[in-house]
């Protein structure tokens, strides 16, 4: 489980395999912070570390990514050098500054527009049919693993505002119109919606 507060931006260092992928991400985590079997949120996707390699001042983390995960996330677009939002799993007693993020992607969404307003950014994303009933104004949502608040919804879109700090400390700073992002809806919204069925 995660909080949606990105700790650092990693870089894709190696991608191997055609269907299932062997993905290696270069990070600045300390070796003592992780172990084989640790869960790491990578662009919102919960992955399990299977290899850790120290590389001078960097730590290379390797993960196995299934064909299924690739097909339902934006991992299909990853290439060497791609920026990845990273967060280690929560421990008992950790501060929850965002909201509970499970690392299970519901869908992918496309950035439709980006507007800078003062020192913040207004982003408009497409609203896939399978999450329309789960995304509400002032509700929480995780985009590429980042805990955010929905500012507005329309029939086929939703909007979020990104403050300057979040923009500069996540891979949002490299996002462009038509880019795909990973979406995880708020688990509370899912439970409430399903309880009404």
Image: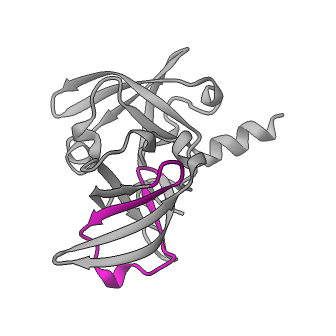
In the picture as drawn, the residue positioned furthest to the top comes out as: 155
Q: What stretch is highlighted in magenta?
A: 17-44
Q: In which quarter of the image is the N terminus?
A: bottom right
The answer to if 158 sits in the magenta stretch is: no
Q: Residue at the location (48% across, 48% down)?
A: 18
Where residue 17 sits: x, y (%)?
Answer: 46, 54
Q: Residue at the location (48% across, 20% down)?
A: 157
Name which quarter of the figure residue 56 lies in.
Answer: bottom left
Name which quarter of the figure residue 16 lies in.
Answer: bottom left
Where residue 167 sits: x, y (%)?
Answer: 24, 42
In the picture as drawn, the residue positioned furthest to the right comes out as: 197
Residue 42 vs 27, above or below: the answer is above
Where residue 118 sits: x, y (%)?
Answer: 15, 28
Viewer-side residue, 153 vs 82: 82
Is residue 123 shown left or right of residue 127?
left
Is residue 191 shown left or right of residue 52?
right
Q: Quadrant of the C terminus?
A: top right
Where residue 132 sits: x, y (%)?
Answer: 61, 26
């Amino acid at each position: 489980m995660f909080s949606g507060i990105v700790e650092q931006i990693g870089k894709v260092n190696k991608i191997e395999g055609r269907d299932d992928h062997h993905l290696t991400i270069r990070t600045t985590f300390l070796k003592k912070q992780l172990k084989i079997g640790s869960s790491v949120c990578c662009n919102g996707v919960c992955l399990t570390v299977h290899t850790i390699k120290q590389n001078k001042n960097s730590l290379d983390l390797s993960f196995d990514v299934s064909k299924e995960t690739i097909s339902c996330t934006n991992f299909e677009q990853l290439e060497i050098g791609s920026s990845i939002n990273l967060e280690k799993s929560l421990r008992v007693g950790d501060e929850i500054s965002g909201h509970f993020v499970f690392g299970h992607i519901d869908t992918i969404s496309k950035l439709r527009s980006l507007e800078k307003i003062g020192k913040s950014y207004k982003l408009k994303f497409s609203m896939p049919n399978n999450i329309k009933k789960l995304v509400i104004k002032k509700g929480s949502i995780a985009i590429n693993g980042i805990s955010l608040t929905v500012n507005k919804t329309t029939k086929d879109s939703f909007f979020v505002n990104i403050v300057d700090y979040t923009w500069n400390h996540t891979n949002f700073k490299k996002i462009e119109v038509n880019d795909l992002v990973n979406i995880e809806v708020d688990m509370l919204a899912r439970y409430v919606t399903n309880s009404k069925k």
